[in-house]
Amino acid sequence: MNALQKEILSLKEKKHAVILAHNYQRPEIQDIADFIGDSIELCRKARATEAQIIVFCGVDFMAQSAVILNPDKKVLIPSKGALCPMAQMLPPDYLKLWQEKYPGVPSVLYVNTLGEAKALCDVCCTSANAVKVVEKIPSEKILFGPDSHLAAYVAKKTGKEIIPVPPRGYCPAHVLFEAEDLLALKKRYPEAVLMVHPECPMEALEVADFVGSTSQMCRFAQETKAKTLLVGTEIGLIYRLKKENPDKEFIPAYPEAVCTAMKANTLEKLYLALKEERYEVALPQETIEQAQKSLEKMVEVVK
Ligand code: 13P
Ligand code: SF4
């Protein structure tokens, strides 16, 4: 552990804070986090913590979810630059337009949305539970946003009519995965298994051996007998995979799949976040109250 990491941990103790980190965070942050996980696990931890300060090492929509679930706590995000581009693709007014176009059709929003959009939907979901959430909704037609690729995956799995809003929303890191490249990689490593995140295009999902959220991939990696795994998601996950499975080999399926928003958080910024209690994430009270219903409903549905 380096001096800055030690300093962060002692500040954290002094301030009774907790550090939550997403699976894509930089290794030096993962190493000192109290908890590392995928979006749903981080929601659960944020909901359960006793700490008065939550330092959220992830992106804006995740820190906002922590605020929505803990309006009385102080939620800090180390970098103002940790803005998920996919979440920006669904402005609340645009969602309203589609809701007016399809009256009575329920809206399911991926947690990768801004708090103001969450406040307008019926229920939220994450990549780990999107299929289950949509299955539970008593409607054969559903508005789903902002990821059109996850929407296509959910449509295939549930057989329901899923209307993607916006029609071409995407994650800039996951859209890079091409079926042709993945097949070439499988040919080069015939003994390997391929794990792919459901934010990837359908053609990539079709050639995968396993499709799941980042933490579901971590569990699959531990359970599979395969010794070599091809990793079809943001490359940050590989650090955790290697740490938990030192006897296995992990090969990035696309080494340039980097989420710059996730990497905006650095150890230095984490230190300053704790020291100066910056940057506090806030939302209007009305938004919190409405978005809370959609998030709590998700947690309830998949219990
Ligand atoms: P999960 O960790 O929930 O799979 O989400 C991945 C992601 O892209 C978060 O932005
Ligand atoms: Fe957003 Fe994609 Fe980064 Fe996740 S990986 S935070 S969806 S840009």
Image (cartoon, rainbow, N blue to C red):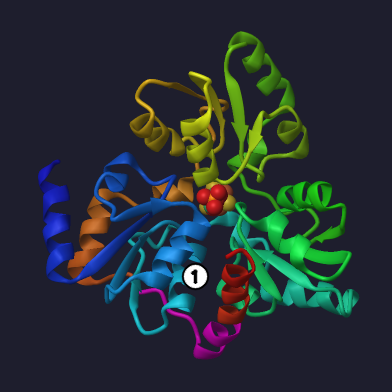
Q: Position of residue 102 (x, y in %)?
A: 89, 74
Q: What is the residue that sits farthest to the bottom in this orientation?
A: 286
Residue 150 sits above or below residue 43 on the image: above
Q: Amino acid at mark 1?
A: Ser
Residue nearest the viewer, comparing 140 with 91: 140
Q: Quadrant of the N terminus?
A: top left
Measuring 55% from the left and 80% from the top, which residue is drawn there? Answer: 292
Q: Quadrant of the C terminus?
A: bottom right
Q: Position of residue 161 (x, y in %)?
A: 89, 58
Quarter holding residue 84 = bottom right
Measuring 50% from the left and 89% from the top, which residue is drawn there? Answer: 285
Residue nearest the viewer, comparing 24 with 220: 220
Measuring 75% from the left and 52% from the top, which residue is drawn there? Answer: 148
Q: Is residue 269 left or right of residue 1?
A: right
Q: Position of residue 173 (x, y in %)?
A: 58, 41
Q: Is residue 229 left or right of residue 246?
A: right
Disc 1 on helix, strand or loop?
helix
Residue 281 sits above or below residue 240 on the image: below
Q: Residues within 10 Å of mark 1 (few under 14, many from 20)?
A: many
- First to last magenta residue range: 280-290
Q: Is mark 1 within 8 Å of ligand 1?
A: no
Q: Position of residue 218 (x, y in %)?
A: 48, 39
Q: Label 1: which residue?
A: 65
Q: Is residue 51 at least partly visible in the picture?
A: yes
Measuring 59% from the left and 79% from the top, which residue is drawn there? Answer: 291
| Residue 282 within the segment the image draws in magenta | yes
